[in-house]
């Protein structure tokens, strides 16, 4: 079967139309969805955040071990409730030539803390005062926070542009390694690398077959993920195409509306967890390019619980649980499942549907284009859905998605989970250094895992395909930072970009 699928993909790719030559001076990165917002503090979708990572320099960055390091500012903890921030010497100017100032830093912090649409508001609410004193920006906190620098990975824009609110989302201004050039008709954007002028176009190509075709025919030079896995061996047959793969931190999960009388029942969620054969899905649909997950944080992260007991594949147990509720294969329980129109995600949904049908659940798949789908999830219009968390750097994510104070729109507790114990543990852990907080984060993960707020699915690998550029490796978090180093292949330039 696998050989037939791969042969079918090869035939499709060879028979579909001829290529159109791309601009020889523009590097084309084909992406599946358009960025929704180029505001550095209000974007919530993965593509926007990844592009914003190129446009804006952050206050604080992270090293390879997820430890905070100076970005635009360095910091000093004066005492339990006071920090001093100072600009790092010689910061790169904004694209208009003006250097970032402490006023820009202060405006960034206030916007991230105070804007109702800010996904950072929950983690920065305890910053009581933000005051400029000469070359120092002084922060006064309402509580002790030894890990505040970890929460300051915030892109910085000019204060006057932040004051314009949502306008910045369409007309960005940053000091990052790339500058914004223009939007294009497909919803994508054109950027230029500041150090050498390399032009990168993010071209929105929703159909995965067309993305692969554009790479094969030279209309695109970069693809990352979002392709059917059986197509990768086909593309690798082209000597002009290189593939680099790396284990990723992207965490996929099934989420539930816990206020719904059906999916709010733990027995239903446990039945679903036992009915899904994750190992088989990773083996056959992902063709090994993923690994089953038990918690959001990828293995090796300092706060990731290493010994959570998996919700193993056990259809007999699933049938028994549903039997307690009066349901089974002869009297299935109907549940609505929302997903996007991405073909691969629809294939995963179909497998879920088949596996759940065997134990007595009638999974009713509802697929919509990304904007409608994501809007429904944020608004709580679902029983069950599947999504992925990307770019996770630290356990701050637990406050953002599991604390009862993080209900939308101020947070991403989309399932409306409430636990006074988890709230208390999160609040305590936030006040402690890493070493002391680790055991509390372990306990948080144990409670959430046992409660089945999510059914954890897998951590997906990042696969980066390149054509006519020097091969580069993807980053674990799936970000686009590799574009800082990407270069045309020498022989490609010497051939006149033919």
Image: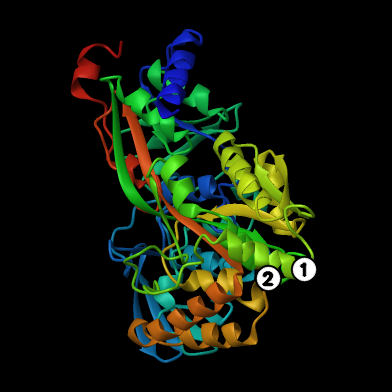
Q: Going by the image, does 378 lie left or right of 477?
A: right
- Crowding around mark 1 (Cα neighbors within 10 Å: few <14, some 14 to 19, many 20+) is few
**In the picture, which quadrant includes the N terminus?**
top left
Give the camera-side residue of 391 and 351: 351
Kindly tell me whether residue 426 is visible in this rendering: yes
For mark 2, give the secondary structure: helix
Residue 275 badge: none
Quarter of the figure with residue 179: top left
Quarter of the figure with residue 60: bottom left
Pointer 1 residue: 325
Give the camera-side residue of 450 and 444: 450
**In the picture, which quadrant includes the C terminus?**
top left
Relative to 233, residue 216 above or below: above
Q: Position of residue 136 (x, y in %)?
A: 39, 77
Q: Find out whether the residues at labels 1 and 2 contact each other: C-beta distance under 8 Å.
A: yes
Mark nearer the N terminus (1 vs 2): 2
The tally of labels here is 2
Q: Residue at x 30, y 33 (%)?
A: 243
């Amino acid at each position: 079967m696998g050989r037939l699928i791969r042969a079918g993909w090869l035939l499709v790719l060879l028979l579909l139309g001829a290529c159109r030559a791309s601009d020889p001076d523009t590097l084309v990165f084909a992406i599946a969805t358009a960025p929704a917002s180029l505001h550095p503090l209000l974007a919530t979708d993965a593509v926007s955040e990844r592009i914003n990572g190129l446009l804006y320099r952050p206050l604080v960055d992270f090293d390879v071990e997820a430890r905070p390091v100076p970005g635009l500012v360095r910091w000093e903890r004066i005492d339990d409730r006071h920090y001093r921030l100072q600009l790092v010497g010689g910061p790169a100017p904004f694209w208009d030539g003006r250097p970032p100032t402490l006023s820009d830093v202060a405006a960034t912090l206030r916007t991230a803390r105070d804007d109702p649409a800010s996904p950072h508001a929950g983690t920065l609410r305890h910053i009581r005062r933000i005051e400029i004193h000469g070359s120092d920006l002084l922060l006064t906190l309402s509580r002790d926070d030894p890990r505040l620098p970890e929460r300051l990975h915030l892109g910085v824009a000019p204060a006057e542009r932040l004051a314009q609110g949502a306008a910045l989302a369409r007309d960005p201004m940053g000091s990052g390694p790339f500058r914004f050039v223009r939007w294009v008709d497909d919803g994508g954007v054109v950027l230029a690398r500041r150090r050498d002028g390399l032009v990168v176009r993010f071209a929105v190509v929703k159909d995965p077959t067309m993305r692969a075709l554009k790479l094969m025919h030279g209309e695109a030079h970069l693809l990352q993920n979002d392709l059917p896995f059986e197509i990768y061996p086909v593309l690798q047959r082209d000597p002009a195409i290189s593939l680099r793969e790396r284990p990723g931190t992207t965490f996929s999960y099934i989420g539930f509306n816990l206020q719904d009388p059906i999916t709010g029942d733990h027995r239903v969620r446990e039945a679903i967890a036992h009915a899904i054969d994750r190992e088989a899905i990773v083996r056959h649909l992902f063709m090994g390019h993923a690994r089953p997950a038990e918690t959001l944080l990828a293995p090796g992260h300092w706060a990731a619980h290493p010994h959570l007991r998996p919700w193993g594949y056990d259809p007999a147990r699933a049938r028994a649980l549903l039997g307690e509720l009066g349901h089974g294969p002869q009297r299935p329980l109907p549940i609505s499942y929302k997903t996007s129109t991405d073909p691969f995600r629809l294939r995963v949904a179909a497998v879920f549907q088949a596996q759940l049908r065997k134990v007595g659940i009638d999974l009713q798949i509802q697929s919509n284009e990304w904007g409608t789908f994501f809007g429904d999830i944020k608004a709580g219009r679902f029983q069950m859905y599947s999504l992925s968390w990307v770019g996770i750097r630290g356990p701050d994510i637990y406050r953002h998605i599991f604390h009862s104070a993080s209900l939308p729109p101020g947070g991403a507790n989309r399932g409306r989970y409430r636990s006074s114990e988890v709230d208390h543990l999160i609040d305590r852990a936030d006040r402690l250094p890493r070493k002391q907080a680790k055991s509390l984060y372990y306990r948080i993960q144990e409670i959430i895992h046992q409660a089945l707020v999510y059914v954890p699915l897998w951590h997906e690998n990042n696969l980066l395909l390149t054509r006519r550029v020097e091969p580069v490796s993807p980053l674990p978090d799936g970000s686009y930072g590799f574009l800082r180093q990407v270069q045309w292949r020498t022989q490609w330039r010497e051939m006149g970009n033919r």
